[in-house]
Amino acid sequence: MEKNHLLLTIVTPEKTVLSDKPVEAVTIPACGGEMGVLPGHASFVVQLKEGLMHYKEGQHKEVFAVLSGFAEIHQDKVMVLAEAAELSREVDEERARQAYQKAKQSLAVQGADLDLDEANAALRRAAVRLKLAEFRRTHKK
Amino acid sequence: MASLRDIKKNISSIKSIKQITYAMKMVAAARIKRAQGAILASRPFALKMETLIEDLYSELGEADLAGTPAHELFEERAEGGTLCLVLVTADKGLCGSFNTNLLKAAAAWLKENRGRKIRVVTVGRKGRDFLHRLKGLDLEIIHEMVGIFPKAGYVHAQLLVDELLKLYSDKNVESVTLIYNEFKSMMTQQIVTGRLLPLKRSVLEKKTCSTGQCGVFSFEPRKAELLSALLPRHIGAQLYRTLLESQAAELAARMNAMESASKNATELIEGLTLKMNKTRQAMITTELNEIVSGAEALGG
């Protein structure tokens, strides 16, 4: 491991997205706000909320949408346990928009209160995906 | 004796059954690879989750833990409360003894706890139907999840966890038991009856500050809150694994059952073809006999 590198691992229950990938900097959506991590960061355990996660590796930048989870930073290793993580290019903007609309509608109807949490979660997820798609659009130019 | 036409009909129907069973076998075989892959892919998450919980717990004193929602999940509860059962079965039949054995195990468990108030969460159509048929028990089906196989995802596990935790905290549930089929190998499945809640303390007490990293971590939000947010995910990961195991076991069972069904069909077809040929031969012989005797009668 090089001195000025972080090892980034992202795992979700369904797959391992990244495993010990050397990167220069990571930004994670902590529950108290965005948090930048550079090599030599203090050991930290943090809860994540749904949001965008960036990492930088040389000139190469990559953006993920993570949907709530945890991150552990220890000895220049960043371990992200997320419920879902999606690469920006995997996100379908149109579908996200549709999901957003649908979630909003089902929230407006407010049928059985049992589905309320689920609808809220779906809304947040869709919002993150939309944000990601927007981010991708603005940074492509 | 069956007529030639009957046998022919019989053979052709067996042939089409064989085609179906063979196709089902191939489908199961193709899906099982993906199911096994999903099990493997879910392992790192569960492992990392455990290390994270261990790390967190080693930082956390017993005093910090007392009284938090996280602590409640570990606490043994007084006996005599309601019992909760999570039964994971398949949605479809035609997978050998997969469901039968599960339902037998469930029935045995229910018999053992006869007279107690029992609440059930079922996954899979077969289990649900079985429990609906039961009468004379103090049984309440809280939640049923049908039609998730063979595409069980973490979302489903998450839903189950939410439901279970709500049940566990609101109602006076003594313990949550899990009955499912574990995927041992392609040939064998094993029925597991395990306790899901309260959580085993052994998860926590593996290494307390053995690595000497005590006090190095900072936390956001506070430790206890973090742990209470982490534990549902831990249970979720466990349940997710359960669902995947059951899914793979179902496919393996179906593959084996369908393979032997195809084999049996082949044997049946062989036997029937032999019988058909014999019947045809017998018919020809009788006909010949008749012709010869007829000719003799005319000529004589």
Image (cartoon, coloured by chain):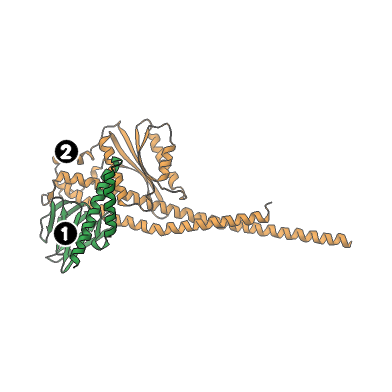
Chain colours: A green, B orange
Give the x, y percent position of residue B85.
34, 39
Give the x, y percent position of residue B271.
61, 56
Tell me the distance, in whole angstroms, between the alpha carbons under discs 2 and 1: 31 Å
Left or right, residue B209 beside residue B257: left
Question: How many numbered discs, if any?
Answer: 2
| Residue B133 in view, yes or no | yes
Dot 2 amino acid type: Ala
Q: Quadrant of residue B41?
A: bottom left
Left or right, residue B210 beside residue B89: left
Q: Quadrant of residue B62?
A: top left
Q: Nearer the viewer, residue B93 or B60?
A: B93
Which of the image's four quarters has the C terminus of chain B?
bottom right
- Looking at the picture, does residue B138 appear above or below residue B183? above
* Crowding near the residue tagged with mark 2, few <14, some 14–19, many ≥20 C-alpha atoms within 10 Å: few
Q: Nearer the viewer, residue B267 or B171?
A: B171
> Which residue position is annotated with label 1?
A77
| Residue B47 in view, yes or no | no
Give the x, y percent position of residue B108.
41, 38
The residue positioned 16% from the left and 43% from the top of the image is B224
Left or right, residue B110 beside residue A121: right
Identify the chain of the residue marked 1, using the numbered disc in the image: A
SS category of the residue bearing label 1: strand
The reply to whether the C-beta atoms of the residues labelled 2 and 1 are less than 8 Å apart is: no
The residue positioned 45% from the left and 55% from the top of the image is B255
> Which residue position is annotated with label 2?
B66
Q: Quadrant of residue A96?
A: bottom left
The residue positioned 42% from the left and 54% from the top of the image is B252
Q: Residue furthest bottom?
A: A59
Identify the chain of the residue marked 2, using the numbered disc in the image: B
SS category of the residue bearing label 2: loop
Dot 1 amino acid type: Lys
